[in-house]
Each structure stands twice: as structure tokens, then as C-alpha cells.
Amino acid sequence: MLVKDAMTTDPIVVRPTTTLPEIRDLMKEHNIRRVPVVRENGQLVGIISDHDVMTALPSPATTLSKWEMNTLLDQLEAKEFMTSPVYVTSPDCPLEEVARFLRDRKIGAMPVMEGDRLVGIVTESDIFRAFVDMLSGGDIPGLRFELRVERHRGILSQLAHIVNDNGGSIISMATLNEPDGKHKRVLVKEEGADAESVRAALEDADVEVLDVRERGRCAFPTVG
């Protein structure tokens, strides 16, 4: 999956001269947490997050009067508290590379540029939603297998054959290398197979089954 498959296109933007109250109201109105800052000619010059807005607001301990605070806020413009320069990405960048970059830099979003033109914004929420869609298998009923296997050529093909031979069809598959460098965990989502038949076939193939269950069976109660 690429950035263009997950990003928000035509993002809401502000100008360098947009005031803090205007930005705060814009974020609230559209339920967004970040806005790129662009000049009249479309040039990207920065980005503002809801954290930037909160940081720019006066402290509750201030001795300023309400009138004085409102006057100061009305004068505070985006160019004075935006993050600049700003990291950007392209529509054709693999989504996992962006996810890793955001994690490593501890930032929550990046504008998406096509040449000199702003075409979108990709946020941690966009990435989370995309990865959930990729891993969940959707709303189709079926089984979820979590396996531990040795890393060797053909293991994923072998797992696919086991599922198919027992009446199933793989919807999604993901792997995670273990620290020992010799094993990996494999998450398989499928539909149509008999759980016990697949489990028996996996055991016959000397595949360690860590977990097997029907998808969508978790409960999410509230407490407190």
C-alpha cells in the first residue's frame, strides 16, 4: 500500500497570516488535528498541530486580563508558531516507510507533495486505519491463526497449501521476524476452512500453533 492509498486529499490549509483563534475554530469545525500552512501561491511553508495551538495559548496562571489575552491571540499568526521546515513525503512512497519515519521522529503527520504541489496529508490515524484494514480481513467470517515457524524458503507457500487443502482461502497474511533470527511469527486470516482440520494439518507439518480462533469474537466491555 502506498501513501496515495491512505492519505487525505485536498487537505484544509491556512495562510501564514491566519490567526490562532481562526485556526483553533477551523480545527474544531472540521474535527482535524493538523493543518498545513501555505502561501497564496500554494507554496508549503509549515504545519500546525493541535499541540502547537495549545502550546501557544496563554497559561491559566497568566496575570493578563481576558481582554488583554483576546487581543494577543487575535494578533498571533500561524507563521509565529507553526513548525517549519516540515518533513514531507510523496504519493508513491510505501506506507510502511512513512509509518516508520513518523514513529522514529515522533511526529504525527506529513504533508504529501507532488513536485511543488501539496496534494494531501497522511497522518498516524490514516496509517492506523490502513493497517487495520490490511490485517483484519474485513467483516467476512473466518479463522485467525497465529503461528511460529522456522525461517526458510517456501514456508509461506506451505502454509497457503495447508489452508487451501482444508477448504479455506487466505484473506490476509502478515509476518514478524523474531529476535533469534531463525523464526518468524505468521498471522493468517482465512475463510471457509475447518479449524480442527487446519490445526491437525499444521501439527503434522511440524508448525507451532500459538493461537487459533474465529475472527471478531473479542468483547470490549466498559469499566469504571
Image (cartoon, rainbow, N blue to C red):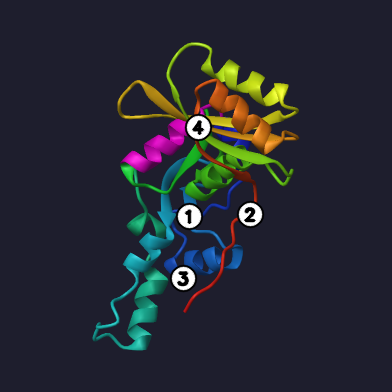
* Crowding near the residue tagged with mark 3, few <14, some 14–19, many ≥20 C-alpha atoms within 10 Å: some
Secondary element at image label 1? strand
Q: Are marks 4 and 2 in contact (CB under 8 Å)?
A: no
Query: Looking at the rendering, in which quadrant would you find the N terminus?
Result: top right
The amino acid pointed to by label 1 is Arg
- Report the mark closest to the observer, 3 or 2: 2
Residue at the spot 45% in from the left edge and 14% down from the top edge: 152
- The residue carrying mark 3 is 21
Question: In 3D space, how far apart are the residues under numbered discs 3 and 2 (Cα atoms)?
Answer: 45 Å
Q: Residue furthest top?
A: 153
Q: Are marks 3 and 2 in contact (CB under 8 Å)?
A: no
From this viewpoint, is residue 172 visible?
no
The amino acid pointed to by label 2 is Arg
> Sequence-wise, which precedes: disc 1 or disc 2?
1
- The residue carrying mark 4 is 147
Residue at the spot 55% in from the left edge and 64% down from the top edge: 26
Question: In 3D space, how far apart are the residues under numbered discs 4 and 3 (Cα atoms)?
Answer: 52 Å
Quadrant in which residue 110 is drawn: top left
| Residue 20 on image: x %, y % | 43, 66
> Sequence-wise, which precedes: disc 1 or disc 4?
1
Q: Is residue 35 left or right of residue 180?
A: right
State which region is magenta: 90-104
- The residue carrying mark 2 is 217
Q: Is residue 97 magenta?
A: yes
Secondary element at image label 2? loop
Secondary element at image label 3? helix
Question: In 3D space, how far apart are the residues under numbered discs 3 and 1 (Cα atoms)?
Answer: 14 Å
Q: Is residue 106 left or right of residue 171?
A: left
Quadrant in which residue 194 is drawn: top right
* Crowding near the residue tagged with mark 4, few <14, some 14–19, many ≥20 C-alpha atoms within 10 Å: some
- The residue carrying mark 1 is 34
Question: In 3D space, how far apart are the residues under numbered discs 1 and 4 (Cα atoms)?
Answer: 39 Å
